[in-house]
């Protein structure tokens, strides 16, 4: 380009001019944006509605800036739009970090209520979801006997096993202490829910057989399908799961 000016050139007065084949740069930039948008659309089922639309809106300032710059030559609106997009991305990353549990990497209690409230609004009598509430059996004894470092390791391993046992679009969060909650989207069949619970138990049994820890990791779980007709709030649904868990523990 500095030699032949195909894409652009800069004259002796340091003024920028588009070249005859400037459209190649535009096509490359458009292909990046298109690839990102297509990737988001293909993974729509893995994303919450809020995350899906937020990711799509990230591209809007850049696209608008590019269109304006195409019509108004000499106005660098594309970079202004890109800067706004980067700002949105940064803020979204910070929000995501605030919603993540620092120890286990799953979501934390801050995100549970907003996620569950949104899911309740989206649910209907024809399509609902399920919840599983659980805690680690004898976690206090683990901390007392083996120390808090080993207790933290038990929490991390528990989170990893739960992630491997569930689907990618299921919501997993650390509720607090040794308590975890799973919200399984579009799982409204009680038999399938019981199979998911059995799968979790089997995963922990398989892990314990490896003998990686000086103790066995087991969970007590309470689980239920959300019934839209009951009109439960997110807090009421979690409370019901909590009661079912303690019933299971007893």
Image (cartoon, rainbow, N blue to C red):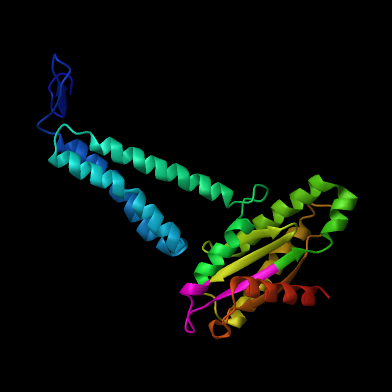
Residue span colored magenta = 120-133
Which residue is at the far right? 145
At x 69% / y 73%, what residue is drawn?
239
Q: Quadrant of residue 183?
A: bottom right
Query: In the displayed structure, would residue 102 be above or below residue 200?
Result: above
Of the pair 151 and 49, the residue shown nearer to us: 49
Q: Is residue 210 left or right of residue 27?
A: right
Q: Position of residue 89 (x, y in %)?
A: 42, 44
Q: Position of residue 122 (x, y in %)?
A: 46, 73
Q: Position of residue 117 (x, y in %)?
A: 54, 69
Q: Quadrant of the N terminus?
A: top left
Q: Position of residue 175 (x, y in %)?
A: 68, 60
Q: Quadrant of the C terminus?
A: bottom right
At x 22% / y 42%, what residue is drawn?
66
One can see residue 213 in this view: yes
Q: Is residue 123 magenta?
A: yes
Q: Is residue 43 magenta?
A: no
Query: In the displayed structure, would residue 13 be above or below residue 149?
Result: above
Give the total number of marks visible in the rendering.
Answer: 0
């Amino acid at each position: 380009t500095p030699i032949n000016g195909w894409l652009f050139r800069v004259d002796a007065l340091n003024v920028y001019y588009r070249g005859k084949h400037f459209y190649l740069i535009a096509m490359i930039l458009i292909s990046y944006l298109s690839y990102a948008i297509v990737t988001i659309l293909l993974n729509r089922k893995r994303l919450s509605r809020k995350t899906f639309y937020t990711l799509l809106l990230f591209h809007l300032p850049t696209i608008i800036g590019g269109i304006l710059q195409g019509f108004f030559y000499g106005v660098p609106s594309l970079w202004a739009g890109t800067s706004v997009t980067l700002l949105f991305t940064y803020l979204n990353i910070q929000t995501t970090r605030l919603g993540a549990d620092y120890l286990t990497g799953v979501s934390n209690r801050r995100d549970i209520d907003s996620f569950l409230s949104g899911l309740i609004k989206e649910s209907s009598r024809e399509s609902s979801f399920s919840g599983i509430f659980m805690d680690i059996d004898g976690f206090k004894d683990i901390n007392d006997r083996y120390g808090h470092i080993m207790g933290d390791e038990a929490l991390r391993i528990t989170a990893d096993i739960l992630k491997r046992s569930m689907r990618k679009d299921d919501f997993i969060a650390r509720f607090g202490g040794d308590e975890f909650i799973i919200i399984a989207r579009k799982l409204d069949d009680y038999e399938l829910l019981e199979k998911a619970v059995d799968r979790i138990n089997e995963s922990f049994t398989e892990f314990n057989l490896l003998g990686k820890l000086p103790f066995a990791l087991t969970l007590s779980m309470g689980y239920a399908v959300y019934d839209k007709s009951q009109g439960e709030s997110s807090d009421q649904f979690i409370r019901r799961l909590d009661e079912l868990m303690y019933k299971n523990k007893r």
